[in-house]
Image (spheres, rainbow, N blue to C red):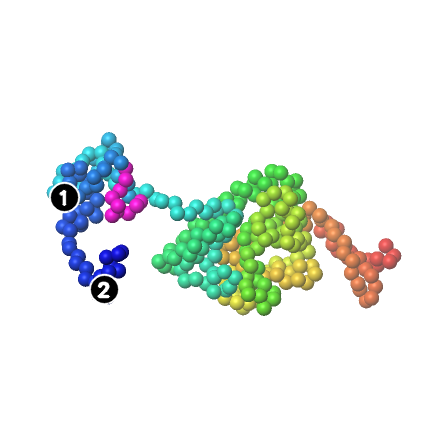
Amino acid sequence: VQVLRNAGEEVTLTVSFLKRAPAFLKLPLNEDCACAPSDQSSGTSSPLCDSGLHLNYHPNNTDTLSCSSWPTSPGLRWEKRWCDLRLIPLLHSRFSQYLPGSDLCRQNAFQVIAVDGVCSGIIQCLSAEDCIDWLQAIASNISNLTKHNIKKINRNFPVNQQIVYMGWTEEREQDSLQDRMYTPKFLALRGSSLYKFMAPPVTTWDWTRAEKTFSVYEIMCKILKDSDLLDRRKHCFGVQSESGEDLYFSVELESDLTLWEKSFQTATFLEVERIQCKTYACVLESHLMGLTIDFGMGFVCFDAATK
């Protein structure tokens, strides 16, 4: 460095070609080869080689690479060892093709975020086909892990409190002045309720701290068609609560949307089958009335003042 500092404004570098370099970079394994690593028994690779390549000794191995003009050395071979730069547990993790909080989709790229917030960074694929293959594979693994986890959790819950669905979605903010258009939310269908969490519930206590809870038999769910979409996100559904509140959710894949629809229908059916009968207060022509919905006997509307 000091020499360069004192060399003036112009510096001339002379580069010479090392004839042994090409053979060296091809990783010859013969111990008599002058371009082979000097310490072949150490199990380490040449500093000029990829750090994932290691020289291992296998007594029964005769399938080795070598310079064409040199005899091979039995028992030695180069092996590729994958180095784990980052490990992301897929249970309760989520992935997204969209820029965080927006409806802008990355082109052939996505990222995976673990439940503790550790992120894979942007994973860029060579083609749309490669990208969808990766997304489907990751989604399948997450789904299998979630199903297995649900089975374990359900062992501790009574029949009327069984979990039917758990998974990540992104909720569209109703306030247009928000910096983020979408916020990750974790939805769960358990027993008679739809739970909305900021993070997946891990303990029994977590289930009591849901951001919002809705009765599944008092809300409506609608899978949105292209004409109903509010922005560029493709796979969306809406939930309307008994109070008239409209919630708008987005998922990543069409298979995620299908799974949600099937799970919601299952949860609603199981709960309606369990309760069988429900009475609601209502008003008819300024009179306080009662409406009983009985799936065994039928529907009855009566004057609440006389009954």
Horizontal placement of 302 versus 227: left or right?
Answer: right
| Mark 2 or mark 1, whichever is nearer to me | 2
Question: Please, what is the three-letter code of the amino acid marked with disc 1?
Answer: Ser
The extreme front residue here reads 6
Look at mark 1 in the image and give the residue it sits on.
68
Horizontal placement of 15 versus 238: left or right?
Answer: left
Look at mark 2 in the image and give the residue it sits on.
8
Q: Which of 95 and 129 is in front in this view?
A: 95
Q: Nearer the viewer, residue 192 or 1?
A: 1
* The quadrant where residue 15 appears: bottom left
| Magenta extent | 43-52
- Residue 277 locus on image (x, y percent): 74, 50
Horizontal placement of 279 versus 27: left or right?
Answer: right
Mark 2, other Cα within 10 Å: few <14 / some 14–19 / many ≥20 = few
Residue 268 visible, this angle:
no
The extreme left residue here reads 69
Q: Is residue 44 magenta?
A: yes
Question: Please, what is the three-letter code of the amino acid marked with disc 2?
Answer: Gly
- Residue 123 locus on image (x, y percent): 40, 55
